[in-house]
Image (tube, rainbow, N blue to C red):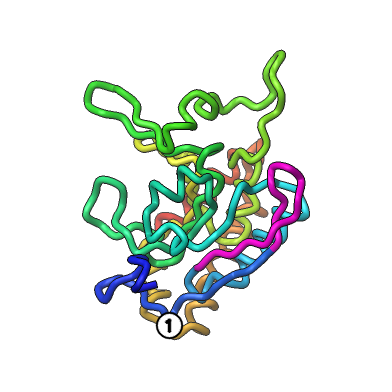
């Protein structure tokens, strides 16, 4: 990964704490393909569950390859509609490390689920640009138009139930429809500092706490309960 500019000596997580997760997925032509992404060791089992569930749902992915294939270039990965996770890079337009640099975030089908930011004049910037005319309208069931598979809204619960509670589609600026992450910076910091087995236990406790909140939530709709329980988990 050093050779492919995906990781450096000052990256917050080094190779020893990363794991490759391999899985099968269904592509947009209905064909079964092999996929692979790289995540923090504490997340590996849950990420395996996520992609097994997506396969069982026949939720399509365009591609799923480690970011080394793109020499660490996130824009190139997005343009290629690649689902990916670890990449030791900064947040888009900021100095802080991205959650991808800790191996605790996954981007899903970027062309179907673009990243949208807004300038001071209100002008929208869409990444990848090819998504601007196809994926900005997030309604799926529309008169006279075919369904659009691969949209992240369909799998928010799959990711949340396995610990990636924070979805970029919840945000106002930027809006990052492709992005799912653990979400609690305090938890991520503790997991990175802890031995792998301890980190895994912390992550499972986080997931169990969210599930318990959902079970007890008095809200009328599941979406409202999920929003409240995600907000509660992120206060940590």
Q: Can residue 136 be seen by looking at this rendering?
A: yes
SS at badge 1: helix
- Please say if 134 is above or below 230: above
Q: Residue at left 36%, top 79%?
A: 193
Q: From the viewer's perspective, is 28 left or right of 176?
A: right
Secondary structure, magenta segment, majority class:
strand
Q: Quadrant of residue 125?
A: top left
Total numbered labels: 1
Quadrant that contains the N terminus: bottom left
Which residue occupies 29% across, 60% down? Answer: 97
Residue 222: where, in percent of width, then height? 66, 41
Picture quadrant of residue 163:
bottom right
x then y, percent, for residue 102: 39, 67
In the image: residue 85, left or right of residue 215 = left
Residue range highlighted in magenta? 24-38
In the image, farthest residue toward the top: 144
Residue 186 visible here: no
Above or below residue 4? Residue 223 is: above
Q: Assess whether residue 110 is covered by the magenta stretch.
A: no
Q: Crowding at label 1, few (<14), some or many (≥20) Cα neighbours within 10 Å? A: few
Q: Is residue 140 above or below residue 29?
A: above
Q: Nearer the viewer, residue 204 or 68?
A: 68
| In this picture, residue 93 sits left or right of residue 188 | left
Q: Residue at x 41, y 37 (%)?
A: 127
Q: Is residue 32 magenta?
A: yes
Residue designated by label 1: 16
């Amino acid at each position: 990964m050093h050779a492919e500019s995906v990781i450096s000596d000052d990256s917050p997580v080094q190779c020893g704490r990363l794991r490759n997760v391999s899985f099968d997925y269904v592509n947009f032509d209905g064909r079964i393909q092999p996929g692979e992404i790289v995540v923090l060791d504490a997340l590996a089992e849950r990420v395996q569950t996520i992609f097994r569930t997506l396969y069982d749902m026949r939720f399509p992915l365009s591609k799923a390859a480690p970011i080394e294939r793109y020499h660490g270039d996130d824009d190139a990965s997005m343009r290629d509609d690649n689902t990916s996770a670890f990449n030791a890079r900064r947040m888009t337009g900021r100095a802080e490390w991205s959650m991808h640099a800790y191996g605790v975030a996954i981007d899903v089908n970027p062309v179907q689920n673009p990243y949208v930011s807004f300038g001071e004049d209100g002008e929208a910037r869409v990444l990848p640009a090819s998504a601007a005319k196809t994926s900005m309208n997030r309604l799926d069931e529309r008169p006279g138009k075919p369904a659009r598979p691969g949209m992240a809204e369909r799998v928010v619960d799959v990711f949340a139930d396995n610990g990636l509670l924070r979805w970029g589609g919840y945000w106002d600026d930027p809006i990052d429809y492709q992005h799912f992450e653990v979400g609690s910076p305090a938890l991520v910091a503790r997991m990175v500092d802890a031995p792998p087995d301890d980190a895994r236990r912390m992550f499972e406790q986080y997931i169990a706490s969210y599930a318990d909140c959902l079970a007890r939530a008095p809200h009328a709709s599941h979406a409202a309960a999920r929003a409240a329980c995600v907000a509660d988990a992120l206060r940590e």
